[in-house]
Amino acid sequence: MEALINRLEALLAENSIFTLQTLSYYGEGLSTTVQLVFISLLIGLVAAVPLAIGRGSKRRFIKWPIFAYTYVFRGTPLLIQLYLIYYGVVFVDGIQETWLWVLLKEPFVPALVAFTLNTAAYTTEIFHGAIKATPKGEIEAARAYGMSPALTLRRIVLPSAFRRALPAYGNEVIFMLHASAIASVVTIMDLTGAARFVYARFYAPFDAFLFVAAIYLCLTFAILYLFRYLEKKLLAHLQPMT
Amino acid sequence: MTRLMPSNTMKKVLSLSILSLAVAATSAQARDYDEIRIGVDVPYEPMEYRTPDGELTGFDIDLGNALCAEIGIQCEWVVQGWDGIIPGLMARKYDAIMSSMTINDERREQVLFSEPYFTPPSAWFAPATSELEETTEASLEDLTIGVQRGTLQDNYVTDMYGDVADVNRYATADDMVLDMEAERLDILFLDYPVGKATLLDSNNRNYKVIGDMITEPKAYFGDGFGIAFRQRDEALAEKFNDALESLEEDGTYDEIHQRYFGEE
């Protein structure tokens, strides 16, 4: 490891911008971005499943609140949601004295909350669309076998809906990664935050932002590859026979 | 022959005196000011601005008047917009510029600067309830410091305290003040005049300055403001430098500094 660092240092000896110091900023930024995006996607995904089922419910008091939620969070910019949550919580009287403040004081948790609520809203709509597109025949067949509505949902509707939702959800993951670039406006040192720092420090916009763009590109390729693999495996029955 | 001799001498004397006159004339042009005009761009509080009844005032104005009094020449202020302030000096609309002009190499090619007379100070601001008394690596450990991204304050704090404290970087000073009020930040480091206007003058004295104002080291805080002259007026610049030195020695400088940058 030390030998590797020494070699890296020798490689960077001629470079005034990309020193070990600035690379460590980018490194920490990468870790923050990945954490932020991964955790918010995970919670968003888990929350979206019951929300998507509820969204298709016939009962109005379940259907409408969920629709209102997805409508608001898909209908307003993520940046505004982030501002409202980060600066808005401060105006709740006495929040600084509660246990919640330990979480909300740092910018990470407010950003995580904003990202999670946003991605959960989009994912809910993606799943809802996929559930609605279940062929009627499959449900009728399940009924004919004597399955209860709950069992039909668990065994027939959801598995095929998830498969159908996979390509659209892959896009959502990539969008979320790119949307996370706004985290730096609330002082989080994510990848973009690190790039802005290097830019301001060395007055070198091209070097700083091109480098960070390359990192985002690599992350995007990794996500694309993962989803292509999943689609190949899970949607094999839909591929044309060769 | 004999008649010509005195005439020749006359000619010599005459041409010599003309020469010396010319020398005297050019030297008077470059040296002997008994009154000068100084160009200034207003308003730029608290350095130069007008009182409600229209009179010029500010740190630059008071210091400039004190310098002229020390040298013993008459001074007149000429108000000039910033864009044309160096061309105006070249066009002899005035003989010096004293208008919060930062000394830098580009300007040095056009004008002659005095010694720096002022460096805009930065200062640490914290809530009035803060127990901090000084800003050292030990006292700032694990605190959250707010700075404006990409400013000289950011560079200074990152290099001096980046390893021991959390540094939160903001796009604007307003965002920073908002987070200070939200108790997300323990301490801010920013331009003293900006901090004074946003934190000390409003907010019912909820904030205070910790420690001294900071203008050193030069690598971070720059060369400061200088008085600009035409390149050939070296003697005039020298007079102002001497006067500046004596005002710093006799306490007049500190008194004027206190007037505009002191704490109430």
Image: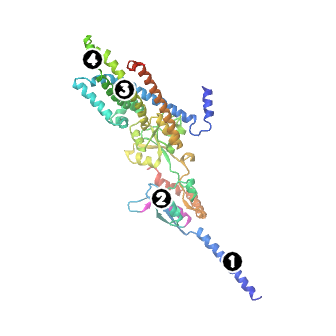
Give the spatial CA distance, label 2 vs label 4.
Answer: 78 Å
Magenta stretch holds residue B61: yes
Observer able to see residue A96: yes
- In the rendered image, residues at marks 2 and 3 fall on the same chain: no
Label 4 Cα neighbours within 10 Å, binned few <14 / some 14-19 / many ≥20 = few
Residue pointed to by mark 1: B16
* Mark number, residue A206: none
Task: State the separation of the CA atoms marked 2 and 3.
Answer: 54 Å
What residue type is disc 1 on? Answer: Leu
- The residue to which callout 3 is attached is A44
Helix, strand, or loop for circle 4? helix
**Which of labels 2 and 4 is toward the front?**
4
The magenta-colored residue range is: B55-72
Q: Which residue is mark 2?
A: B83
In this orientation, does residue B155 appear?
A: no
Dot placed on the residue nearer the N-terminal end, 2 or 1: 1
Residue A55 falls in image quadrant:
top left
Residue placed under numbered mark 4 in the picture: A137
Q: Farthest residue to the front: give it.
A: A242
Relative image position of residue B253 (x, y in whole percent): 52, 56
Residue lying at 42% horizontally and 62% vertically, measured from the top left: B55
Considering the image in quadrants, where does the N terminus of chain B appear? bottom right
Q: How far is mark 2 from mark 1, CA to CA? A: 45 Å
- Quick check: do tags 3 and 4 share a chain? yes
Where does the image place residue A90, in percent across and percent down from the top left? 36, 36
Q: Main secondary structure of the magenta part?
A: helix
- Which amino acid, by three-letter code, is at mark 2? Asp
- Kindly report the distance in space between the C-alpha atoms of the residues bearing marks 3 and 4: 31 Å
